[in-house]
């Protein structure tokens, strides 16, 4: 069970790291020259939803390990 928790935590941390990197790379790189005026606000909306989802997943898996 402990190994499964560690694997789940590693996957969650990797997802958070990818999300944070996307939060920098996408709006300031990929979408910086986008002709769509709503591309960046839509990205930030999606980014916020993903971050909220990852926080909910992380909090629901908290447990007292002491």
Image (cartoon, grey):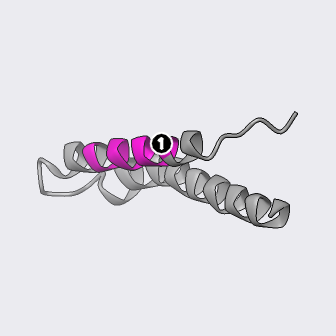
In the rendered image of this protein, does residue 15 appear above or below residue 57?
A: below
> What is the x, y in percent for residue 2?
83, 60
> What is the x, y in percent for residue 53?
42, 47
**Which residue appears at 33% of the width and 45% of the height?**
49
User: Badge 1 is on which residue?
Assistant: 56
**Which residue appears at 76% of the width and 66% of the height?**
4
In the rendered image of this protein, does residue 25 appear above or below residue 49?
A: below
Crowding around mark 1 (Cα neighbors within 10 Å: few <14, some 14 to 19, many 20+) is few
Q: Count the marks: how many? A: 1
**Which residue appears at 83% of the width and 39% of the height?**
65
Q: Is residue 62 left or right of residue 50?
A: right
Viewer-closest of 41 and 46? 46
**Which residue appears at 36% of the width and 60% of the height?**
30
Viewer-closest of 28 and 16? 16
Q: Is residue 43 left or right of residue 54?
A: left
Viewer-closest of 15 and 7? 7
SS for callout 1: helix
Region rendered in magenta: 45-56
> What is the x, y in percent for residue 57?
52, 48
Q: Please tell me whether residue 55 belongs to the stretch shown in magenta.
A: yes
Q: Would you identify the image quadrant in which residue 64 lies?
A: top right
> What is the x, y in percent for residue 7?
74, 65
Quarter of the image that includes the C terminus: top right
Q: Is residue 65 left or right of residue 13?
A: right
Q: Is residue 48 left or right of residue 9?
A: left
In the rendered image of this protein, does residue 29 appear above or below residue 24?
A: below
Quarter of the image that includes the N terminus: bottom right
């Amino acid at each position: 069970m402990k190994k499964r928790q560690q694997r789940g935590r590693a996957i969650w941390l990797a997802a958070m790291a990818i999300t944070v990197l996307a939060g920098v790379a996408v709006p300031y790189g990929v979408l910086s020259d986008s002709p769509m005026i709503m591309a960046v606000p839509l990205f930030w909306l999606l980014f916020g939803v993903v971050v909220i989802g990852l926080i909910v997943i992380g909090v629901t898996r908290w447990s007292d390990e002491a």
